[in-house]
Amino acid sequence: MAGSFFKGRFLSLFDYKTEKYIVAKNRKVGLLYRLTQLTILGYIIGWVFLSKKCYQETDEAIQSSVMTKLKGVSVTNTSESGLLLWGPEDYVIPPQGEAVLFIVTNFIETPNQTLGYWIMTGQCLKKDENSNGTCEIYAWCPIERKYKPQEPLLTNAENFTIYIKNFIQFHKFGFSKSNVLEKTDNSYLKKCRYDEVLHPYCPIFRLGDITKRAGYNFQDMATFGGSIGIMIRWDCDLDKSSYCHPQYHFTRLDVSDSKKTIASGFNFRHTRYFKNAAGESYRSLIKVYGVRFHIMVHGKAGKFNIIPTAISIGSGLALMGAGAFFCDMVLLYLMKNGGSYREKKFEKAEITQDNTQEDEECSD
Amino acid sequence: MAGSFFKGRFLSLFDYKTEKYIVAKNRKVGLLYRLTQLTILGYIIGWVFLSKKCYQETDEAIQSSVMTKLKGVSVTNTSESGLLLWGPEDYVIPPQGEAVLFIVTNFIETPNQTLGYWIMTGQCLKKDENSNGTCEIYAWCPIERKYKPQEPLLTNAENFTIYIKNFIQFHKFGFSKSNVLEKTDNSYLKKCRYDEVLHPYCPIFRLGDITKRAGYNFQDMATFGGSIGIMIRWDCDLDKSSYCHPQYHFTRLDVSDSKKTIASGFNFRHTRYFKNAAGESYRSLIKVYGVRFHIMVHGKAGKFNIIPTAISIGSGLALMGAGAFFCDMVLLYLMKNGGSYREKKFEKAEITQDNTQEDEECSD
Amino acid sequence: MAGSFFKGRFLSLFDYKTEKYIVAKNRKVGLLYRLTQLTILGYIIGWVFLSKKCYQETDEAIQSSVMTKLKGVSVTNTSESGLLLWGPEDYVIPPQGEAVLFIVTNFIETPNQTLGYWIMTGQCLKKDENSNGTCEIYAWCPIERKYKPQEPLLTNAENFTIYIKNFIQFHKFGFSKSNVLEKTDNSYLKKCRYDEVLHPYCPIFRLGDITKRAGYNFQDMATFGGSIGIMIRWDCDLDKSSYCHPQYHFTRLDVSDSKKTIASGFNFRHTRYFKNAAGESYRSLIKVYGVRFHIMVHGKAGKFNIIPTAISIGSGLALMGAGAFFCDMVLLYLMKNGGSYREKKFEKAEITQDNTQEDEECSD
């Protein structure tokens, strides 16, 4: 007897239980519900899946390595420094090919500075505006002349080219790629110049083109200096196996939208130290203006994954439930014969009197 | 006939179907269910929406560009180097205004080193601890003297100021901003100093204040060197159009919480090469101690988006379903008259005998 | 009367309403449904919770600070430069211990260059390949000799060691840690070398070991230069309080998978400026080949949080709903006696004639 009881219990596990529905022949609410369903379905398929690709797991933690190399020479002629030839070894600071690099376009050299006590005459009156006017100061003299640059000295800096090598990796998917595409050969790299339309994957950029694409004139920036961001964007869809190409964007970084130039311009000073035959130090102080390029790499990769797909479908279905709840409210409380539907929908469970009373007593 | 059949079929599409419910007049479970609903609703509104802002799409991939400029001078007087004047061109390494920069606060100069074979006497006995004691080595001599610095030589380095220009961008929302707020003018920038309360948006920081906010004394760090992280946090709510301001935090990076100083201190050596009249090289070896500042920018921006809102609402509703399931269990299996409710809730579908048998046969 | 009416209304709020189910004694569909439930449950527990840890809130915006220090010396002997001793102050560029650093392994020095007009003879015929052959050019002469390096000059560069200090922080959880573990002492740090198995937490690496782990021979890379990525991965489970250790990975960055060497090699030029007794400038141009190390830190931390847990459970439950819908379809439309089940499941709400007509009129 007991065996057959448990067998019955076990078999009843495989009885299929399905919710009982009330069919309300109310076409207004029926239409409303179908519209709600269609809207949610359209949203899930169109927006969540096709547009936002919510069926993909994404990796936004892109790892990136950037190397740069400049080419081009320029000649300057100033009274202090004479005729000078500038190669990449001089105008790129620092010279070791980093992702943040500064290109000298203008400079003021103060050669042969020596450190000593100087009786205050003429230029040496005040070292800086915070010091009081004293008769003698200990300073590097001659001090740097006050000079508002009118135009860049390295006139053809806009023709310099920058070769950007960028290597990226998406750790989550074990995917890596370089912006120097594998099909490119050395002869192409020797003569190509980046162009959005004609050569979108050429990794060599003319400086003047970069500033033009950022919306500024190179010569204007070159006088007082400035800062340009070169954004390399990788938007990789790893489901389409080969779709992972770099896109380049250029922005000026030191000027805000409102064109107030409070933070614009870029310059700094560096020195070269020498010693004379007697072993005494002297130096050249060089104030350089120029364009600072900051190569920023960002991007994300997406690949089909069951979890985000399930979450998206799940929450879409839950929204359908919300739609049904909304239509129920309309049917039961806004329709004229809602009361009748309420009676049908909510069936009173008439439990035998004894049990109910027992229950009532407990609940008191 | 067929036409009217399909018409009926089509029209039945717009019959509204709604789940049939059993009303159980059991106040314990009813109260339990209402409480569950209220809890879930409170959690969704209070925590998910108000506190965690789950109705927003977020962009955590902040793009940032940092430029720095130091101001201040210091004078040192040592037997090897004599009286020296240190300006930003000397004490900032590298000088080009990067986000990771080193401020010299202490140094040991070994001037006039020449490269040659040296008979081992005194200091030159062992180049480094791995070499065996030989009579002659090829080395730069005189070698650097062993010296444990007692106090920083650049005594007023804590009064130097650092001007930090930070430009950020959230690509997903096309939003960009600078920490030099647009309303600030040049005269304000000339005299302001960052202060958490009085000048929270002044981008100029006194070095001594930075270390103090990180919980350390500048003079202590200056002797052996150290490393300070300047975190700029951007927590932008783009729904409130203007709410996007930088917040600054300061941490010491080379000392762990347990105060073991195993990884603390910071120094490195660099050189200046000279040639004498005969064209022979000699150099100054300069070991510098100092504070390394690492400006790290992080942050996120949030903006209302229908997808995270739908996901949050959907999963909240699904939780309501879980609540109903839990209350069902209580009602059907824990209440005294659960059996009666079970009978009511699960209506046996009595299918006509013929079909059932057919079905049974198929399932065998 | 009215009071008792509202009291009834209020009390009915606490009536518990539960969906009415139809029990279909169809074991095929019942089994199908149970299987679906088990699959979804298994997926939620096994994959979502145990494997992917979807119950955790994650912080992927790791903040990191890296400091490096090289040790080791090498001697070179060339006709141009004579016998030279290379210490870290010479072969590490830049010297200040950054996360991106270049180690000189090979070099071509062109000493005593002077700037002037040079009658074109021999080597000075063409400055670079883009210039036409003129009789006189203004250039630094003697120009750099064309030279294809055969082997690295700093022969024991592979024995140099690099000490990497990495400090990380997860802002969201207020968690910070260093890769120099707190239990390590100074004597261990003086002699340990990183080894994946024996010393996985020793932060000191032999350069030759790094390239070997990246799959390349150091001497091969040293001749023309190259680029190596040192990835430090932090995968922190903050629920297990102490589980947060660094893992090191090494990749070559300048060679793509297809072994085409188009982007491989790494070199740049830098200069040292001198002045002779007459104050005239001359310089040494040094073209350096070497290995560029890029230390990249990435990682994420996860910690239990109720929101992702709720979202995961919620969407799992919604998937159960989808399973029930699928089984319904099977029962109602694929089973032979589906029609009978349909009639049972969908109960027609027979509303009193008057109301229905009213409703019909409205809907026209």
Image (cartoon, coloured by chain):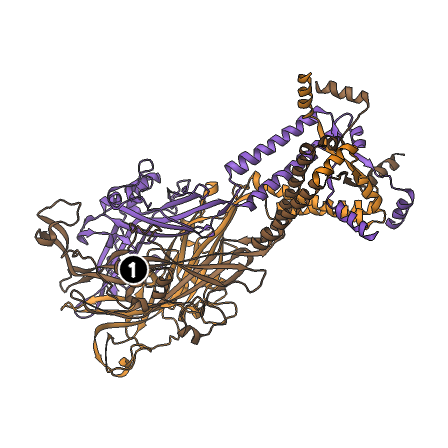
Chain colours: A purple, B orange, C brown
User: x, y (%) of residue A59?
Assistant: 48, 48
Q: Quadrant of residue C304?
A: bottom right
Decide: is A249 above or below C243. above
Q: Is residue A307 left or right of residue B254?
A: right
Q: Quadrant of the C terminus of chain B?
A: top right
In this view, A160 is above or below C97: above
Left or right, B209 with reference to B124: right
Q: How many marks?
A: 1
Q: What amino acid does circle 1 point to?
A: Met
Tell me residue C129's x, y (percent): 17, 47
Tell me if residue A196 can be seen.
Answer: yes
Quick one: quadrant of the N terminus of chain B?
Answer: top right
Chain of residue at mark 1: C
Q: Quadrant of residue B126?
A: bottom left
Residue A33: percent from left, percent from top: 67, 29
Instruction: Name the residue tied to disc 1.
Output: C221
